Image (tube, helix red, strand yellow):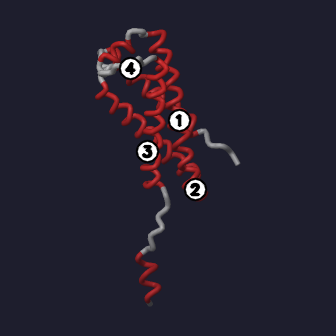
């Protein structure tokens, strides 16, 4: 049986979307404003939905809930890992003033380093992936509801 390339392909596409969105925000100076993180969720949601829909079409009659769920998780995890690598490089090499600017928005008395911020971003990406995958699987799973025609034929 052929392995699906959808999690890798769509994971890369989602990551590209996240990177482009982040860089556009950086160009206009809004990358440190946390309200624009909602755009990340929208990009991930659209990408996961399309990936899971494509996976269901690819599998056809052999589609299983568990496999579809894993396809969604792997897609999001791939996107998160790629974006986290970009983010770590960006924060440490491209724009070293980003982290202090971002942390100025937080009122914290703790020392927060690059590793902590990258870890938090990864956890946020993984959590978003998990919740969206669970949500979208409700759309793609097979219904167990009995059809009305079946009920009428049983009564007759």
Q: Please name the residue that numbered disc 3 is placed on.
A: 131
Residues marked 3 and 4 touching at CB (< 8 Å): no
The answer to whether 52 is drawn above or below residue 83 in the figure is: below
Marks 3 and 1 in Cβ contact (< 8 Å):
no
The secondary structure type at the circle numbered 3 is helix
Q: Residues within 10 Å of mark 3 (few under 14, many from 20)?
A: few
Can you identify the residue that label 1 sits on? Answer: 77
Q: Is residue 150 left or right of residue 31?
A: right
Seen in the picture, residue 119 relative to 133 is either above or below; the reply is above
Q: Which residue is mark 2?
A: 64
Mark closer to the chain start, 2 or 1: 2
Marks 2 and 1: which is nearer the front? 1
Name the element at disc 1: helix
What percent of the width, then of the height, locates residue 100? 36, 13
**According to the image, label 4 marks what residue?**
110
Visible residue check, residue 147: yes
């Amino acid at each position: 049986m052929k392995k699906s390339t959808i999690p890798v392909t769509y994971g890369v596409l989602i990551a590209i979307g996240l990177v482009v969105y982040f860089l556009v925000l950086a160009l206009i100076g809004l990358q440190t404003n946390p309200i624009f993180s909602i755009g990340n969720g929208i990009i991930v949601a659209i990408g996961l939905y399309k990936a899971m829909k494509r996976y269901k079409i690819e599998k056809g009659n052999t589609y299983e809930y568990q496999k579809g769920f894993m396809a969604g998780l792997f897609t999001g995890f791939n996107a998160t890992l790629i974006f986290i690598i970009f983010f770590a490089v960006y924060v440490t090499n491209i724009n070293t003033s980003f982290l202090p600017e971002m942390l100025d928005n937080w009122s914290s008395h703790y020392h927060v380093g690059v590793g902590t911020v990258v870890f938090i971003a990864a956890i946020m990406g993984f959590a978003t992936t998990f919740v969206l995958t669970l949500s979208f699987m409700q759309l793609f799973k097979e219904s167990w509801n009995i059809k009305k025609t079946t009920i009428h034929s049983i009564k007759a």
